[in-house]
Image (cartoon, rainbow, N blue to C red):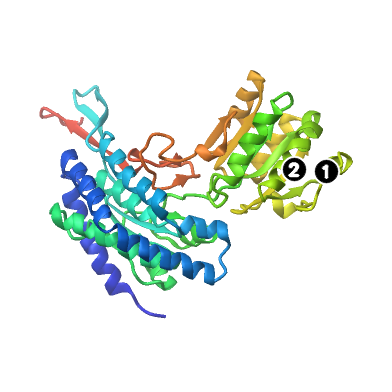
Amino acid sequence: MKDYSNEILEMGSKAKDAARLLRTKSSSDKDAFLIELYNQLGIFKEAILEANELDVTRARESGIKESLVERLALGEKRFSEMREGLLQVASLKDPVGDVDSMWTNTSGLKIGSRRVPLGVIAMIYESRPNVTIDAAALCIKTGNSVILKGGSDALNTNIALMKAVGRAIEIKGFPEGTAQLVETTDREFTGQLLSARDQIDCVIPRGSKGLINFVANNSRIPIIETGTGNCHIFVDKGYDVKNAVEIIINAKTQRPGACNAVETVLVHSDCASKLLKSLVPSMQAAGVTLALCESSFRISHELGLELEHCREATESDWETEFLDLILAVKVVNTMEDAIEHINKYSTGHSEAILTKNYDNAQKFLDFVDSAAVYVNASTRFTDGGEFGFGAEIGISTQKLHARGPMGLKALTTNKYIVYGSGQIRN
């Protein structure tokens, strides 16, 4: 077992020194950095995309399923979106320094709650090299320094991206430890990093269930847990079948490897035949394999539907985040049954109800306990950009400090500022 304590201490010390300076940076200074990073990404674009193509090729050669390769790939469109996200973050209001409230207590003290940076953030993530830029942007905008530990599958891309980040840091005169990338792929480094309580204030894991569990079980540093997405859509009786199928196709196939993609569709028994008649062939035509419960399989067979890409669902299907073109389908007798199923198997990420009944919609919102709950929309909207945050550092499925897509405010905490005039406590 290699000892990385010296390397971690060096990185952590640089990050702490940087954090002390970053928390005093003005909003205009931080926005100027983001604009410079936007420019530098344009300059380094060719090298970044070449590095990404190398990572993608190696991923395919190693047999990684295509939906996960898709998360790794940048391409022209995603690269452009990543750059534009920097301008969006720069345009957002900086929460640092905001005084949430101010009051005077019985002793005449004026007490306020001010937003301040968290300090040093360690971001541990897999695939998705755009997270390198999103995390750096959000952390620096909120006056935090960041240590980035990406996955081995995106190492070449992340190194190329960090050259642009480093150049922007140099040009704008920001501290050396503002943003640092861990280049070793040894998991032992991650384990030792999670013990660096004196250097790091917060750890944010983003990736597979295995990664998140590893961080949660081994970290001695407070974490903000971005959870897996076993997401559900419940189709209530009376809802328009055509629109329901459109929403489900979008939620499953637009980016099947995303954490907000739907994994299970629950169908009210009163509309099961009508919906399955359209849903089953539509999903199979889109390349989706269906795991059908006993009732939905029987109904589909009675309808004479082609079931070439269908199989009977097992218990494990209800609890699996497929991250692939696989969809579980279950018929339920009541909305209460749907809510019970969701609260049993959900990972607390994103759930939706498709209904024309206002009371059912409100009940679903009240009784489903997830970070994002939708009425008549695709779960794919659970995203920092879609929520107006410019970007996100992750989607929290825990309940302390931050929940749902985490933008700028989630990367700050508060401190109390107290103005007195010579008071002493009796």
Q: Quadrant of the N terminus?
A: bottom left
Q: Residue furthest left?
A: 422
- Badge 2 marks a residue whose secondary structure is helix
Which of disc 2 and disc 1 is earlier in sequence? Answer: 2
Residue drawn at point x = 72 percent, y = 31 percent: 336
Q: Is residue 353 left or right of residue 126?
A: right
Mark 1 and mark 2 residues within 8 Å of each other at the beta carbon:
yes
**Residue 82 placed where, x, y %?**
36, 48
Give the amino acid type for the residue marked by disc 2 in the picture: Pro
Considering every residue shown, the one lying at the far bottom of the view is: 1
Task: Report whether 32 appears left or right of 126.
Answer: left
**Helix, strand, or loop for circle 1?**
loop
Considering every residue shown, the one lying at the far top of the view is 358
Which of the 4 image quarters holds residue 260? top right
Label placed on residue 281: 2
> Residue at image x 35%, y 55%?
132
Looking at the image, which residue is at 79% across and 46% down? Answer: 293
Disc 1 target residue: 305
Residue 401 vs 334, above or below: the answer is below
| Picture residue at 51% right of the left edge, 60% below the top | 69
Percent x, y for residue 162?
28, 61
Give whichever of 400, 110 is nearer the camera. Answer: 400
